[in-house]
Image: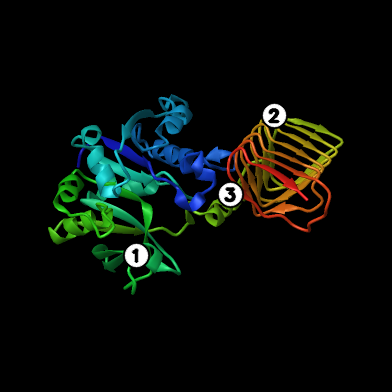
Amino acid sequence: MAGNLKGLVLSGGAGTRLRPITHTSAKQLVPVANKPVLFYGLEALRDAGIREVGIIIGDTGDEIRAAVGDGSALGIEVTFIPQSAPLGLAHAVLTAEEFLGDDDFVMYLGDNLLRDGITPLVDRFRESEPDAMILLQQVPDPESYGVAVLDGDRVVTLEEKPAQPKSDLALVGVYMFTPAILDAAKAIEPSPRGELEITDAIQYLIDQGKRVEPHVVTGWWKDTGKVEDMLEANRLILDVIEPSMEGELVNSNIEGRVVIQKGARLVNSHVRGPAVIGRDAIIEDSYVGPYSSISTGCVVRRAEIEHSILLERVHIEDLDARVESSLIGRDVTISRTDAKPRAYRFVLGDSSVIGLT
């Protein structure tokens, strides 16, 4: 096994399941607890001792570059690797061949979250020296995932979204590889959907007698590709958030685990945690309930928010029913006109303007 271990993070997908948010924004930059999903993966790699990280980018590459920079703020060195089209995870590996060289690497899907990070898994990979290691978790709907069949401590077969799964062990979006995966990716053919599947490349390794080890994840794992999963990930992160107070309270009160970031101002308002109020946000005559993440520059006046994510610079004013279980894109404005609807649930793209009647 090579001494150096690199990271490869995939951030090139279109994010169709998160539309309309992803019509104007990279899905990996949608925030969970006011931090882009992508950053959790980059920090997990850093915490595991990985410093050289390649990031696969696609159509939203400029936005990813602007957010991550050179990686120094996160304690890593970043190389951006454009992928011509989203032609599969194994294709992404081949796209990164020059960056990877002869080094082993961790491949991390940029819209995935793992509660316990990857440090123990990286340590095990270094110690046991398999040709590949895959992370698995039991799921109730294995037909929606890549599925692994095990024989003891070895992977026997992999299937991509099988109609009749032979196990309930789904592939988590983190993989550890030696350079052998490059030869495997070159040897396989595109799947019926026209992609080079990483499951086919790993199956090729197995068929060639290579050792592919499984690791079953016991802590929570979230693929944040859907709105419901994004809100659930937000809830899980907020459940363990450390409270802090850097903003200003004027005739307001907070209870539970709440983060009030620098420049935020609460006036005649109540915040019940777990929740995070971002930099320079203004909360006036309002209630912010549990599992809410209010991003930088948001303004909430005479409204109630709960179990929702508001991206940067959202304005919500004069609502007489609670906004709940919502994901609201950047620069959205929501205000009430005359009538009184009882409840609102929103998934709104950036720069929307909503007038409620």
In the drawing, does residue 23 fall left or right of residue 321?
left
Mark 1 neighbour density, 10 Å: few (under 14) some (14–19) many (20 or more): some
Label count reads 3
Q: Nearer the viewer, mark 1 or mark 2?
A: 1
Residue 233 visible, this angle: yes
Q: Amino acid at mark 2?
A: Asp
Quarter of the figure with residue 214: bottom left
In the drawing, does residue 81 fall left or right of residue 303?
left
Residue 112 visible, this angle: no
Which residue in the structure is indicated by mark 2?
A: 280
Q: Earlier in the sequence, mark 2 or mark 3?
A: 3
Mark 2 neighbour density, 10 Å: few (under 14) some (14–19) many (20 or more): many
Which residue in the structure is indicated by mark 3?
A: 234
Instruction: Tell me what residue is drawn at x 26 percent, y 43 percent.
Output: 93
Q: Nearer the viewer, mark 3 or mark 1?
A: 1
Q: Amino acid at mark 1?
A: Lys
Q: Earlier in the sequence, mark 3 or mark 1?
A: 1
Q: CA distance from mark 2 to mark 3?
A: 21 Å
Instruction: Tell me what residue is drawn at x 37 percent, y 45 percent.
Output: 108
> Residue 158 at x, y = what percent?
27, 63
Q: Which mark is residue 161?
A: 1
> Residue 261 at x, y = what percent?
67, 32
Where is the N terminus found, in terms of image quarters? top left
Q: Secondary structure at mark 3?
A: helix
Q: Are marks 3 and 1 in contact (CB under 8 Å)?
A: no
In the drawing, does residue 291 fall left or right of residue 104?
right
Q: Earlier in the sequence, mark 1 or mark 2?
A: 1
Q: Is residue 9 or residue 357 the one in the foreground? A: 357
Q: Is residue 211 or residue 129 the one in the foreground? A: 211
Q: CA distance from mark 3 to mark 1?
A: 26 Å
Q: Amino acid at mark 3?
A: Asn
Mark 3 neighbour density, 10 Å: few (under 14) some (14–19) many (20 or more): many
